[in-house]
């Protein structure tokens, strides 16, 4: 596996939400937790990975950081957010939890052999993809997965 270019870096994605408590409840249903030290009535720090976080911000708080007008995520896409889980079954479980918690399906299941995913729009209209990737493909690329006879 290649060495990370910047091992000390952390990723924080700032995401505006209409109702912070509703969004926290939604993402809790998907299995996410929040760092209370960086969570208050205007922001919630959602733990995604060891060094990856999504800051759910009220629209007012987000506007304090943004120099440009906010786009409406129900009509404009600026980014799609993807996170991995440990199995194909977990992809389906998390997707079902999202739909049960009020998300809408963005796309049906996509199965590429080495990768399996489902996509949904959260309560504010932001596009999310939950995906699983075979560890061989994740480490060495899809070609190595195919070369190992998995295609």
Image: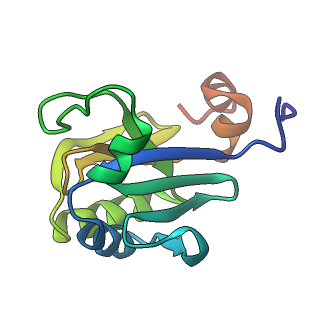
Rendered image quadrant of residue 3: top right
- Quadrant assignment, res 18: bottom left
Look at 12% across and 31% down and name the residue there: 75
Report if residue 106 is visible in the image: yes
Q: How is the image coloured?
A: rainbow
Question: On the rendered structure, is 128 left or right of 145?
Answer: left
Q: Position of residue 45 (x, y in %)?
A: 51, 63
User: Residue 74, image x and y in percent?
Assistant: 13, 39
Residue pictured at 44% horizontal, 43% vertical: 82
Residue 117 in view here: no
Q: Which of 75 and 69 is in front in this view?
A: 69
- Is residue 39 or residue 27 the one in the foreground? 39
Q: Percent from the top left, x then y, of residue 144?
A: 69, 27
Q: Which residue is drawn at 28% across and 73% down?
A: 21
Q: Nearer the viewer, residue 86 or 125?
A: 125
Q: Which residue lies furthest to the right in this view?
A: 3
The percent position of residue 123, horizontal first and vertical second, equals: 19, 57
Side of 81 relative to 23 (left or right): right
How many marks the image carries: the answer is: 0
Observer-nearest of 101 and 137:
101
Single out the residue that lies furthest toward the front. Answer: 64
Q: In this view, does 138 lie to the left or right of 151?
A: right
Going 42% across and 63% down the picture, which residue do you hit?
43
Q: In which quarter of the image is residue 96?
A: bottom left
- Quadrant for the N terminus, please: top right
């Amino acid at each position: 596996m290649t060495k990370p270019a910047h091992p000390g870096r952390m990723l924080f994605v700032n995401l505006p939400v209409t109702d912070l408590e509703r969004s926290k409840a939604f993402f809790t249903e998907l299995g996410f937790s929040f760092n209370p030290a960086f969570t208050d009535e205007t922001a919630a720090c959602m733990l995604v990975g060891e060094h990856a976080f999504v800051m759910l911000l009220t629209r007012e708080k987000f506007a304090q950081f943004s120099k440009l007008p906010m786009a409406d995520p129900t009509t404009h896409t600026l980014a799609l957010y993807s996170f991995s889980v440990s199995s194909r079954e977990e992809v389906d479980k998390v997707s079902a939890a999202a739909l049960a918690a009020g998300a809408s399906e963005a796309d049906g299941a996509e199965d590429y052999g080495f990768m399996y995913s489902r996509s949904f729009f959260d309560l504010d209209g932001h596009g999310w993809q939950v995906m699983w990737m075979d560890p061989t493909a994740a480490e060495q690329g899809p070609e190595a997965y195919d070369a190992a006879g998995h295609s």
